[in-house]
Image: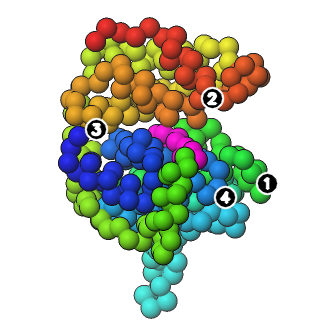
Amino acid sequence: MDKRITALIDNIEKVIVGKREVITKAVTALLMEGHVLIEDVPGVGKTQLAAALSRSVDGMFSRVQLTPDIMPSDITGFTMINRQTGEFEYKKGAAFCNFLLADEINRASPKAQSSLLEVMEEHQVSLDGKTYELPKPFMVLATQNPVETYGTYHLPEAQMDRFAMKISMGYPDRSEETAILERNEYENPVLTIGAVLKTEDIVSLQAEVKKVRAAANVKDYIVAIAEATRNHDAVKLGASPRGSIALYKAAKAWAFINERDYITPEDVRSCAVDVLSHRIMMSPKGKAEFGSAEKIIEAIVKTVEVPAE
């Protein structure tokens, strides 16, 4: 593993206990220039993970606590008249940063959620006939609670499709939870860590990830998995081509993290659930038989023929 990636993951582990694979998946999303949705019950470290990742890189960090009264302009910015010059001036919103933590994203109104669409897809803001580029790297880390639905707004499929990966923290085991108690005894551990990488390092790593190669049969394998989601009777709406592109990019990043300059079918399988599960809609049969989109993707991956390496 590249020493820069190792340093990044090790630094985040000073805050997040026993979740190295989850941390690695978040770093994978960063290296593929994607965004990540962290979905889990309250109190398991969703916000801590996002904060630890952002504090580990010497860049700009913004946090928006999304509530029904949040306006799109809070995220994208707005224009206003400068009383001294009499001219309109653009005031930047929270999106102008390297890492944007959208906490409890499903509590924002659909209007506020939609303000993130262009930001996440094109890394820019278009307002009043002008386009404003966001800094590089740029990543949205959004959190949401899948259990409590009162006072929330379901994320539309177009919004979900903008997230490269959806990951879950899960509960810690007993020894891990004891370690969490000890780390939080005197202060929040996320406040004790500093940056171990510069934004230039992340941009450089992202460029190296793009150079990772894939054989034709591996590309066909990715497409076959995406196509299988569209033809499975447990799925009402399958993954779009954006999903197969995301799986391709994620596999590249996963291969790079594992010190390879080429993708293997195992790289694809390792990322498939995190990349595709939030991009499908389950049919009534799928809900009854599998219970979750993750289980459906796992089943689909097992049925698609694996190409010879």
Question: Which of marks 3 and 4 precedes in the sequence?
Answer: 4
Task: Give the Cα separation between the discs numbered 2 and 3.
Answer: 26 Å
In the rendered structure, which amino acid carries the disc numbered 1? Tyr
Q: Which mark is residue 284?
A: none
- Residue name at image x 64 percent, y 66 percent: 70
Nearest to the observer: residue 45 or residue 179: 179
In the rendered structure, which amino acid carries the disc numbered 3? Ile
Q: Is residue 122 visible?
A: no
Nearest to the observer: residue 250 or residue 291: 291
Looking at the rendered structure, the secondary structure element under dot 3 is helix
Q: Which residues are magenta?
A: 163-172
Q: Residue furthest right?
A: 150
In the rendered structure, which amino acid carries the disc numbered 2? Ala
Question: Which of marks 3 and 2 precedes in the sequence?
Answer: 3
Question: Which of marks 3 and 1 precedes in the sequence?
Answer: 1
Q: Which residue matches tag 2? A: 293
Q: Is residue 198 visible?
A: yes
Q: Which residue matches tag 4? A: 108
Quarter of image, res 278: top right
Task: Give the Cα separation between the discs numbered 2 and 4.
Answer: 24 Å
Q: Which mark is residue 257?
A: 3
